[in-house]
Amino acid sequence: MYNGKARAYTNIALIKYWGKKDKELILPMNNSLSLTLDAFYTETSVSFSPYHTKDSFVLDGQLQDEKATAKVSRFLDIARKKAGVNDFAQVESQNFVPTAAGLASSASGLAALAGACNDALQLGLSEKELSQLARRGSGSACRSVFGGFVEWEKGHSDDTSYAQVVPSDDWEEELAMIFILINDQQKDVSSRDGMERTVATSDFYDGWLETVSRDIQTAKQAIAAKDFQALGEVTEANGLKMHATTLAATPPFTYWSPDSLKAMNKVRQIRQTGLACYFTMDAGPNVKVLCQKKDVSAILAALQEDFTKEQLTCAYAGEGLKSLEME
Ligand code: DP6
């Protein structure tokens, strides 16, 4: 039996990853830039043993079905191949989220699994190599290997596509992200399916790709200059552009629900009162609000005029992937 355990935090993209040029290796069409956050994380342990007769996957105490286990097995196969072993594994994952409302993320989950496999199989991977490995499980997971601001360099092959820290002089310590949880009855389109359909069919996809590297440059300059307004503006604009591509897909779709729009409008209103805050959204109806730590209580108070306390969760900058002791 050989074991490993690791913890990884989730990250939210300020400049989005949206589209793959290689689905097998998970090579993205464009660079993306994210902030790792402290509020949501996953702890995963893995034990390989010649006595296990198959892979098993327990998530939050529940043994997972074949489909969920197969996804984990595909990732384990990549790690097993690197180590030259064939043993099956037991994987146990725990998501730590402040509320149950759909905030668990594949980014923290797959990054934690990559870290646990690295320890269990004694792969001795560097952070860059861990990021490459996590990427194979879920693209955005490669960014959760690092804390703070992180850029995923799209690369052109397995070993040239990985994330790295964006130097920030710890500016992220002054920032926060408020999550507005939106209850949504609609059936989800997963990020994987959504981006695939968009790349294949959206007339707006080329427009997205043409401007995203400029947005990355703008965001990096804003981080270097600690210019919150510039970072907020490019974050909001980039997110809106990503979501515009889905409307021009065939068949068209959107992650926005009526309450997402209500939240976006509220953020604009709060901004008009002089409090700097900007929104972004991912492959779901929740709205995330980028703001400065000093304004958190005023912004939370304003959001509470339209949303319940339970719908609001505040996160701050989080750290990178960490190995843990097995209990
Ligand atoms: C909208 O990383 O979940 O959150 O690589 O297929 O697992 P796969 O997709 P995933 O996509 C995240 C998309 C996004 C934007 C982002 O996080 O950059």
Image: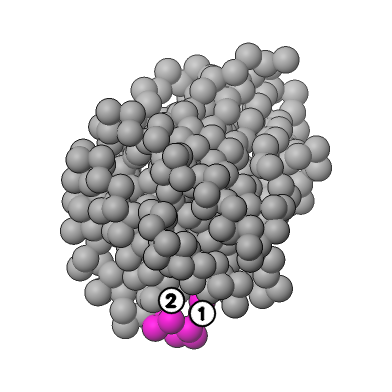
157 left or right, relative to 43: left
Q: Nearer the viewer, residue 300 or 149?
A: 300
- Contact check, label 2 and label 1, Cβ < 8 Å: yes
Question: SS of the residue at dot 1?
Answer: loop
Tag of residue 36? none
The residue to which callout 1 is attached is 253
The residue to which callout 2 is attached is 246
62 left or right, relative to 131: right
178 left or right, relative to 148: right
- Residue 254 sits inside the magenta stretch: yes
In the rendered structure, which amino acid carries the disc numbered 1?
A: Phe
Q: CA distance from mark 2 to mark 1?
A: 6 Å
Q: Which residues are magenta?
A: 246-256
Tell me which colouring the rendered structure shows.
Answer: one colour
Q: Nearer the viewer, residue 118 or 242?
A: 242
Residue 81 appearing in the image: no
The quadrant of the image that shows the C terminus is top right
> Would you place residue 14 above or below residue 265 in this image?
above
**Secondary structure that dominates the magenta span:** loop
Residue farthest toward the front in the current orientation of the protein: 273
At a point 63% along the width and 14% down the height, the residue shown is 325
64 left or right, relative to 19: right
